[in-house]
Image (cartoon, grey):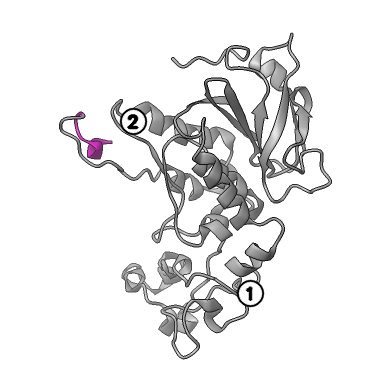
Amino acid sequence: MKYYGLNREQIGSDVSINFLMTYYLDKNIEEKHGLELDKQFDDWHSNLPDFAWPNWCFGSHDSRRITSRLPSKDLIDAFYMLLLLQSGTSLIYYGDEIGMCDRPFTLEHREEILDITAFNFGNQYVEQKTRDCQRTPMQWTSQSVHAGFTSSTSQPYLPLSETWKNVNVEQQEDSSRSHLKFFRQLIHLRRQAPFYGGYQKKLFVTKEIYSLVRWLEEKVFLLVININSNDTIAINFNNIFHCHDKILVGEIIARSCNILDSSSIGNEGNQIDLSNLRLRSNEAVLFKLFLSPNDLSLSCT
């Protein structure tokens, strides 16, 4: 936090990069749950100077791909939501928008390894320490040599990830639903109120569930994620909002790609009774609520 400077007059960095979420993703799988996630967010918000602006970084050239560190690859869309729908600047590493994965590098093919700093740790740690795994070329298409990253007469700086034929921009452009299309949907949303200029509040957090609410004036949106459960979770948001005398209904605005179209939460525009919301493992949904912030006792203070 000291990199932000002392105050508005003696300001330091505008974007003092927040790596707390990167550290969260590096934890053991049993620690990657909603309560630990909430701790990372709280640590940042509680220590952020009043004059400073938050930012969120989930991946970089120094850390393994997000999809390779999540408890399940199906959670990638949920983490896009956390990255793009919270207040603050989102820092995005190329390829994460299509869910690119790490490519293993081994000493058996030592000539492929470019990250020579990995050898400083000794040969027994090179495969673990090399950062080449997350630095492979962007995957544009399955129809061209080198996934369209460079011409057929050139050689890319690193070998392609083995996923390039199934995970690429062209394939996701052509799909009815894809990580890339979902990512663009979220970027469109974050340009609008309340994601741009609105308030936010952590709402309900357990090991299995993470939820937050964004609002501005009469617009209220609810994000809910089943983050690390193998089971279907039922949640009563009437109880959580303490609005037992009102009907709490949410319209689906965005949902993760792993939700089936045939599900009650499978299509944008569906209206759901939030007194009995059911989410399967790794599912995430953004709702627009039909009650005002006053109805839900949401305060700007």
- Residue 172 placed where, x, y %? 64, 63
Farthest residue to the left: give it. 10
Amino acid on which disc 2 is placed: Leu
**Residue 168 visible, this orientation:** no
Q: Look at 49% across and 79% down and name the residue there.
A: 159
Q: Look at 53% across and 81% down and name the residue there.
A: 146
Q: Is residue 89 left or right of residue 276?
A: left
Viewport quadrant of the C terminus: top left
Label 2: which secondary element: loop
Membership of 37 in magenta stretch: no
Q: Is residue 292 left or right of residue 90?
A: right
Disc assigned to residue 129: none
Viewport quadrant of the N terminus: top left
Disc assigned to residue 165: 1
- Residue 39 placed where, x, y %? 48, 32
Q: Look at 48% across and 44% down and name the residue there.
A: 24
* Residue 221 falls in image quadrant: top right
Residues drawn in magenta: 1-7
Farthest residue to the right: give it. 262
* Residue 3 falls in image quadrant: top left
- Residue 136 placed where, x, y %? 47, 71
Discs 2/1, front:
1
Q: Earlier in the sequence, mark 2 or mark 1?
A: 2
In this picture, is 60 found above or below 170?
above
